[in-house]
């Protein structure tokens, strides 16, 4: 027993001293571009293991000895096969410093490019054009990523030209290291041209006649992988199906006409979604959405939505009928209720509306006819109005990324009106043009310019309901002012809204770190009835976060045109376009 206690005591006294801390390593790489350095560090074992718990002096030295070979491999994709590497390794206590000073050396140049097309497609115009525009050519520095891109591009063009079995008989890069030269061989065999055969569907619970409206090609057209992807995207985006599997059947081809089988798995019939958000225009806002994806085998839908905030309450239900081109062509019947209560404007709207949504070239077009019953509590138009309003809107969006655009623009055109002779209490004609432009400035900056212009023609402005008058101020208008707080006033100084609208904005965003941006902006504009004699302006700064589902914007704006020049907080959320 005494010996056992002595042993325990010895272990307690000597144990901590016997455990040595694992060494740590600092790794520096010099002489390379940022991209090359990143790739070298990814190859270096000493970098990957520098904080390992089981790292020892012997392993540090062994990893250091491997480093030159690993650096050579890391530089080869960029065309550097003969780098000069000066390695050094220093030890200070349990801290190691590994440094690699690198001269990449002379780049490897392409001295021979042998591209051949064989088979039925050797004279195919699209393939010959691709050959003439490959991202590799004699005299260029060898970059393996560009070679790979050239190889993939050549085959992709062949496949999309109908040669679905195109394959390379030879595709290689031969590097003559001693001379820093490279020879590229790309020999493509196209095979025979294929055509689309019959398309068959299984599953889905939608009538086949309706499903065929999603097919973007005709039987007998030249085979195209892009057209198959377009078919798949259309079926997936329809929301009817949880799975869309498209399988060519080359073994069943007749005269190179390849049948296609589409296997569909139905989605759940009903979808519910709930949301909670905040904006300074409306305050805290909650929403609930319900959708019945498939009322019948024709693919009709029924949806309902309700959103409630401190300022506005909306309830709507919509019955949708897909038409000839179901991806873009839809007939909708809607019932809408909206109540809005701001400091200056109070109104309540009930509307029945029929609308036709479709694509006209690059433009999204919506033609609608609505019957609106509106109750207003505004300075000069308290009362009830009933209007039958035909309306047309056109929207064009082009952007590199609709959520967080680097470059892009959007144009919205809108026209609407009513006539006393046709079930309406007043006659008016109104047009609105809205535009937004985003342009990159340097690597981290972007400029955002926005403009809204509107005009109304009417002989009886006092009979025009509040929802058809123009107001400004708020998160997406002139920041620094409350939502719908700016516009013409009556003799008592009460807001009445205007016949015309003119608002402009300029903003500069700068990426400071990751998905975070800082912003500076200037807004100006107003609604008016005769001439824009009073232009209100606001300016401020903000923070942006590019979230996975849209830009979160927090702004602090100064009301420059207000004598007291108060500051106002604006918080918004949503995609750039």
Image: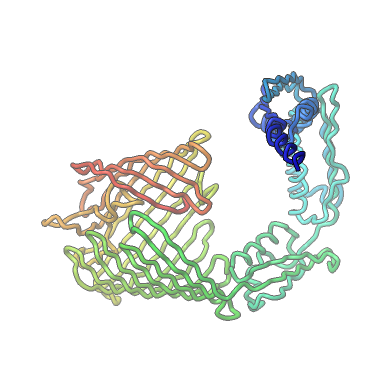
Residue 320 in view? yes
Q: Position of residue 188 (x, y in %)?
A: 84, 46
Q: Position of residue 140 (x, y in %)?
A: 74, 29
Instruction: Spot the residue most to the front.
Output: 2
Q: Nearer the viewer, residue 317 or 535?
A: 317
State how the image is colored: rainbow
**Residue drawn at (48%, 76%) of the image:** 319
Q: Toward which corner of the image does residue 342 lie, by quadrant?
A: bottom left
Q: Toward which corner of the image does residue 139 lie, by quadrant?
A: top right
**Residue drawn at (21%, 44%) of the image:** 562
**Residue drawn at (23%, 73%) of the image:** 384
Looking at the figure, which quarter contains the N terminus? top right
Instruction: Spot the residue most to the left.
Output: 491
Considering only vertical position in the picture, is 196 above or below 546? Answer: below
Specify whether 213 is left or right of 365: right
Q: Nearer the viewer, residue 558 or 525?
A: 558
Instruction: Spot the residue most to the bottom.
Output: 296
Q: Nearer the viewer, residue 154 or 295?
A: 295
Mark count: 0
Q: Position of residue 95 (x, y in %)?
A: 67, 25
Q: Position of residue 282 (x, y in %)?
A: 33, 59
Q: Toward which corner of the image does residue 60 lie, by quadrant?
A: top right
Residue 80 in view? no
Considering only vertical position in the picture, is 316 above or below 87? Answer: below
Considering only vertical position in the picture, is 485 above or below 73? Answer: below
């Amino acid at each position: 027993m005494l010996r056992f206690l002595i042993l325990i005591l010895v272990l307690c006294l000597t144990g901590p001293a016997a455990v040595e801390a694992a060494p740590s390593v600092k790794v520096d790489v010099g002489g390379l571009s940022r991209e090359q350095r990143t790739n070298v560090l990814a190859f270096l074992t000493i970098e990957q293991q520098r904080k390992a718990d089981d790292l020892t002096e012997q392993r540090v030295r062994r990893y250091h000895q491997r480093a030159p070979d690993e650096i050579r491999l890391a530089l080869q994709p960029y065309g550097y096969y003969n780098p000069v590497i000066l390695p050094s390794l220093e030890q200070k206590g349990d801290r190691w410093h590994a440094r690699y000073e690198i001269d990449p050396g002379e780049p490897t140049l392409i001295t021979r490019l042998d591209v051949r097309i064989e088979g039925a497609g050797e004279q195919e115009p699209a393939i010959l054009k691709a050959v003439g525009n490959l991202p590799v050519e004699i005299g260029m520095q060898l970059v393996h990523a560009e070679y790979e891109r050239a190889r993939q591009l050549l085959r992709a063009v062949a496949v999309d030209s109908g040669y679905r079995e195109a394959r390379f008989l030879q595709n290689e890069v031969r590097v003559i290291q001693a001379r820093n030269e490279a020879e590229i061989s790309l020999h493509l065999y196209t095979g025979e041209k294929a055509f689309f055969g019959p398309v068959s569907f299984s599953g889905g619970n939608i009538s086949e006649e309706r499903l065929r409206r999603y097919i973007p090609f005709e039987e007998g057209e030249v085979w195209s992988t892009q057209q198959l992807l377009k078919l798949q995207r259309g079926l997936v985006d329809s929301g009817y199906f949880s799975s869309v599997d498209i399988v060519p059947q080359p073994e069943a081809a007749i005269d190179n006409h390849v049948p296609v089988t589409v296997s569909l798995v139905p989605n759940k019939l009903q979808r519910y979604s709930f949301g909670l958000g905040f904006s300074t225009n409306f305050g805290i806002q909650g929403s609930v959405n319900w959708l019945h994806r498939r009322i019948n085998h024709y693919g009709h839908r029924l949806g309902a939505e309700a959103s409630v905030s401190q300022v506005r309450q909306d309830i709507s239900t919509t019955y949708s009928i897909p038409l000839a081109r179901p991806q873009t062509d839809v007939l909708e019947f809607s019932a809408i209720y909206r109540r809005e209560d701001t400091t200056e404007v109070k109104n309540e709207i009930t509307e029945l509306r029929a609308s036709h949504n479709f694509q006209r070239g690059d433009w999204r077009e919506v033609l609608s006819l609505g019957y609106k019953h509106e109750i207003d509590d505004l300075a000069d138009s308290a009362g009830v109005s009933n209007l039958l309003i035909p309306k047309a809107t056109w929207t064009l969006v082009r952007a590199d990324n609709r959520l967080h655009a680097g470059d892009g623009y959007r144009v919205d055109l809108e026209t609407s009106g009513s006539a006393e002779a046709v079930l309406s209490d007043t006659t008016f004609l109104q047009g609105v043009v809205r535009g937004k432009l985003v342009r990159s400035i340097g690597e981290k900056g972007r400029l955002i310019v926005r403009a809204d212009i509107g005009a109304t023609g009417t002989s009886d402005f006092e009979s025009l309901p509040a929802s058809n008058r123009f107001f400004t101020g708020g998160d997406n208008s002139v920041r620094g002012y409350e939502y719908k707080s700016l516009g013409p006033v009556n003799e008592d100084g009460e807001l009445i809204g205007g016949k015309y609208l003119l608002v402009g904005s300029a903003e500069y965003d700068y990426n400071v770190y990751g998905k975070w941006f800082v912003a500076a902006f200037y807004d100006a504009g107003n609604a008016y009835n005769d001439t824009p004699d009073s232009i209100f302006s606001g300016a401020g700064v903000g923070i942006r976060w590019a979230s996975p589902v849209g830009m979160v914007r927090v702004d602090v704006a100064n009301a420059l045109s207000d004598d007291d020049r108060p500051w106002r907080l604006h918080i918004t959320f949503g995609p750039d376009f």
